[in-house]
Amino acid sequence: MLAWLGDLTNSKIAALLVFFPLFVAIVIYVYGSRKRSDRLESYKYIPLQDDDEQG
């Protein structure tokens, strides 16, 4: 098994099969719930806010 993963071609396929479903799961988690989606979308403005506005 390790010899199969040691081949560069096979390790790229294995990484794709692991990380692509993980990426899709994260996207579904973030945008799946409307309430969570709105909350996370509001965080994108944090770097643009001044310190005195955060009160």
Image (tube, rainbow, N blue to C red):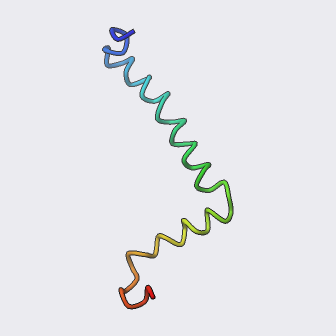
14 above or below 22? above
Q: Specify whether 36 is left or right of 8.
A: right
Which quarter of the figure is the C terminus placed in? bottom left
In this view, the residue in front, 41 or 8, is 41
Tally the numbered discs: 0
Which quarter of the figure is the N terminus placed in? top left
x and y, in percent, of residue 4 in the image: 37, 10
Q: Specify whether 29 is left or right of 55.
A: right
Q: Residue furthest bottom?
A: 52
* Residue pictured at 68% horizontal, 58% vertical: 33
* Residue pictured at 35% horizontal, 11% vertical: 2
x and y, in percent, of residue 50 in the image: 37, 86
13 above or below 29? above
x and y, in percent, of residue 39 in the image: 58, 68
10 above or below 1? below
* Residue pictured at 31% horizontal, 19% vertical: 8
x and y, in percent, of residue 10 in the image: 39, 17
Q: Quadrant of residue 35?
A: bottom right
Q: Residue furthest front?
A: 55
Q: Specify whether 13 is left or right of 37.
A: left
In this view, the residue in front, 1 or 55, is 55
46 above or below 20? below
In this view, the residue in front, 41 or 10, is 41
